[in-house]
Every structure is written in C-alpha cells, then in structure tokens.
Image (cartoon, rainbow, N blue to C red):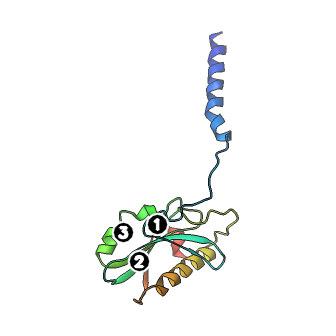
C-alpha cells in the first residue's frame, strides 16, 4: 500500500513538473518606441528593423561597434561603454535581429551574409551622420557572429 501511494505522488509530482511546459505563453512582438535615451532604429534594405545605441564623446578619436553574442543584446555592454567613451571612442552597440529591441519577425534569414549586410548598412547609416571619417573597430561577444 505504501508503495502505491509513493508511486502515485511521484507520478503526480512528475506531471506537475512537466505541465508548465505545455501551457502557452503569449509574447508580444511590439517593442517600445524608444527603450533607452540613446536608442535609435533603422530599417535595413530588406526592411528589417534594427535597434542600436550610440554614445559619443566630446571629441572622437575612434569608432567602435559592439556586437553581442547569442541570447544577448546592447544591454550586455552596459559596463564597457563608459570606459570606451571616456577614452574618446564613439560607441555603437547593436541588437541583432531577434534579440533585444530589434525585429523579432519569424522567418528572417539569419545567415552570415545577412548579418554582415545588416552590420555594414548600420555602419553606413552612422557614418552618414558623422563629420569624422575613419575605420571602425569591432568588439564582439560570440566568435561566429562577427568573425566572418
């Protein structure tokens, strides 16, 4: 009898542990208009809405693009931005599509070619708004995203 009661409660516990995974959770695809004071958005040539943040020093001595890794966002670099800006770097941090505040549409092609295209388009947009010309340095978090 004790064995049957133990099995029953263990089975009930197992069902209760698994049950939450079968309950659908509604997620919103709507994003705030301006999540941070230094937030900006642009639409890529293939109409992908991309969120990025720009922090500029008084005098720019270089430009840095911060690219996050898997399951991260511009928030991941919050502790690095001030040091870079204090050293005179213009800092641009991007939320890659499907992360942070960028486009979360299903069906986006997350290929290396598309990611590279989105990054180049972002750099072109930022460069158009600057009077300074010069190369970009890329700081990445996640080997594969920026390497190619």
Q: Which residue occupies 62% across, 62% down?
A: 104
Extreme residue toward the top, this view? 1
Q: Position of residue 62 (x, y in %)?
A: 36, 83
Quarter the N terminus occupies? top right
Q: Secondary structure at mark 1?
A: loop
Q: Is residue 118 above or below residue 71?
A: below
Q: What numbered label is drawn on residue 64?
A: 2
Say whether disc 2 or disc 3 marks the residue closer to the N-terminus.
2
The answer to which image quadrant residue 57 occupies is bottom left
Q: Position of residue 3 (x, y in %)?
A: 64, 14
Callouts 2 and 3 close, C-beta under 8 Å: no
Extreme residue toward the right, this view? 107
Q: Position of residue 12 (x, y in %)?
A: 65, 25
Q: What numbered label is drawn on residue 141?
A: 1
Q: What numbered label is drawn on residue 81?
A: 3
The answer to which image quadrant residue 45 occupies is bottom right
Q: Which residue occupies 61% across, 26% down?
A: 13
Mark 1: few, some, or many residues within 10 Å (few <14, many ≥20)? some
Q: Secondary structure at mark 3?
A: helix
Q: Nearer the viewer, residue 8 or 51?
A: 51
Quarter the C terminus occupies? bottom right
Q: CA distance from mark 2 to mark 3?
A: 10 Å
Say whether disc 2 or disc 1 marks the residue closer to the N-terminus.
2
Callouts 1 and 3 close, C-beta under 8 Å: no
Q: CA distance from mark 1 to mark 3?
A: 14 Å
Q: Position of residue 136 (x, y in %)?
A: 43, 82
């Amino acid at each position: 009898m004790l064995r049957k009661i133990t099995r029953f409660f263990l089975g009930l516990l197992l069902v209760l542990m698994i049950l939450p995974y079968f309950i659908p959770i509604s997620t919103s695809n709507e994003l705030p208009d301006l999540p941070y004071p230094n937030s900006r958005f642009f639409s890529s040539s293939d109409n992908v809405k991309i969120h990025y943040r720009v922090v500029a020093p008084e005098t720019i001595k270089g430009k840095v693009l911060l690219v996050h890794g898997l399951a991260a966002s511009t928030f991941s670099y919050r502790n690095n931005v001030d040091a870079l800006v204090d050293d005179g770097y213009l800092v641009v941090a991007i939320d890659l599509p499907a992360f942070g505040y960028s486009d979360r549409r299903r069906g986006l092609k997350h290929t290396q070619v598309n990611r590279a295209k989105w990054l180049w388009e972002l750099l072109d947009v930022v460069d158009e708004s600057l009077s300074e010309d010069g190369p970009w340095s890329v700081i990445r978090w996640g080997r594969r995203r920026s390497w190619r």
